[in-house]
Amino acid sequence: MTQAYATSPLRLLTPKNHGRAAWIYTSSHGGGLVDGDDIGIRVSVGTGATAFLSTQSATKVYRSPRGTSAVLDADIRENGLLIVAPDAVVCFAGSRYRQTQHVTIAAGGGLVLLDQVTSGRRESGERWVFDDYVSRTTIHLEGRLVVHEALALRASDGPLAPRFGRFDVLAVAVLIGRGLADEIERLDARVRAESVQRRADRLLAASTVCETGCVLRVAGRTLEDVDYTLRDLLGFVPRLLGDSPWARKW
């Protein structure tokens, strides 16, 4: 880590680790996003460097008639690697949340990016009752747009709960870069080899993007199950970092 700067209510925590990567955890003094909050994060990964970006806990979005928003703008230079693995977004009843992520990757660079959203405070009876959740991710590799992932969940389009049925968690994992080609190939083969079960508690799909990229999509009934699935599929991440960011988190 060469530079780190944040203004309230955002905090940046940079714990030491046993690996070669810089670890950055974002945190909020308020414990979540309240009406009108607008968070912007800019990340630059230098040539040959590795960084891990995550959150201290789940991103809670409180009731917000005017809305809340978060923007990630990341630049990965030659042979750099960025792993973005935040905890899930949890939208409370009556909340509005808009997320934008834009990543540019130079030649030889790599990216692993996770994104998760839950149905809300299910145990409190708030299941898919938020007003608005919009997420948009664009990734450019060597100047070419290779991923444009968008998800819009709006109560104004009709009740969300009936559309999701038994599922309470959605997750997406994007892997891009020539240095990850072997892992991407193994992941794609593993997902395609999984048998499809009727009324399964978890759905998993993979699709290739460009010559060296893959998008994984997971739908699950519990956050614990989806977290376990992602950590299992991305079991190579600790090796890339030289240490496991998940070993001591739970």
Image: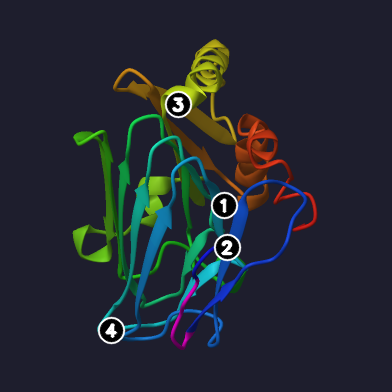
| 44 to 28, vertically: above or below | above
Q: Earlier in the sequence, mark 4 or mark 1?
A: 1
**Disc 2 and disc 4: Cα gap in Å?**
31 Å
Q: Is residue 112 above or below residue 46?
A: above
Q: CA distance from mark 2 to mark 1?
A: 6 Å
Which sits earlier in the primary sequence, circle 2 or circle 4?
2
Q: Which residue is mark 3?
A: 205
Would you say the residues marked 2 and 4 are in contact, meaning their CB atoms lie under 8 Å apart?
no
Q: Which residues are magenta?
A: 4-9
First in sequence: mark 3 vs mark 4: 4
Q: Secondary structure at mark 4?
A: loop
Q: Which residue type does callout 4 highlight?
A: Pro
Front residue of 2/10: it is 2
Asked if the residues shown at circle 3 and circle 2 are in contact, with their CB atoms under 8 angstroms apart, the answer is: no
For the C terminus, the image quarter is bottom right
Q: Disc 1 designates what residue?
A: 52
Mark sitting on residue 65: 4
Amino acid at pointer 2: Ile
